[in-house]
Image: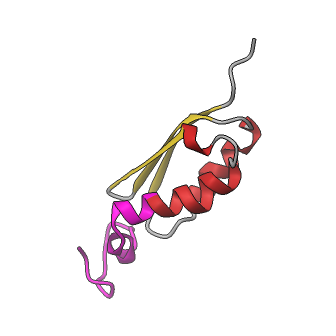
Amino acid sequence: MVAADAKVKSGIRPEVFLRSDEELTAEIRRSVVERLFPLSHKAVKVTVSRGIATLTGTVRDAGLIPMAEHLAHSVEGIVDVRCRLVGPASN
């Protein structure tokens, strides 16, 4: 971990490292996935590794996928988001 008052030349804020990947995963699931996709949230997998969030799965409302990516980016401690969500298959 990096101390909160340390100066980092990489451009990544030091507080990024103060939250565990598990905490970040739980926050994205609760504050992003469950709120945006109440009917299909169980089909969405959220993982975080070293501050990089990955969202995968199929959701009912594909129009909300860009919002989910944006909101996941806004979670403090997340440094990048890999959004692999898709809408329902067309018949």
The answer to whether any part of residue 4 appears in the image is yes
* Residue under the image location 69 percent in, 52 percent down: 36
Q: Main secondary structure of the magenta part?
A: loop
Of residue 61 and residue 13, the one placed in the foreground of this image is: 61
Above or below, 73 against 20 in this view is above
Q: Choose top left, top right, bottom left or bottom right for residue 50.
A: bottom left
Q: Position of residue 9 (x, y in %)?
A: 31, 72
* Residue under the image location 60 percent in, 62 percent down: 31
* Residue under the image location 38 percent in, 77 percent down: 15
Residue numbers of the magenta segment: 1-25
Above or below, 87 against 18 in this view is above
* Residue under the image location 38 percent in, 68 percent down: 12
Q: Position of residue 56 (x, y in %)?
A: 51, 37
Q: Position of residue 67 (x, y in %)?
A: 69, 51
Q: Is residue 76 left or right of residue 67?
A: left
The answer to whether any part of residue 70 appears in the image is no
Q: Choose top left, top right, bottom left or bottom right for residue 89.
A: top right
The C terminus: image quadrant: top right
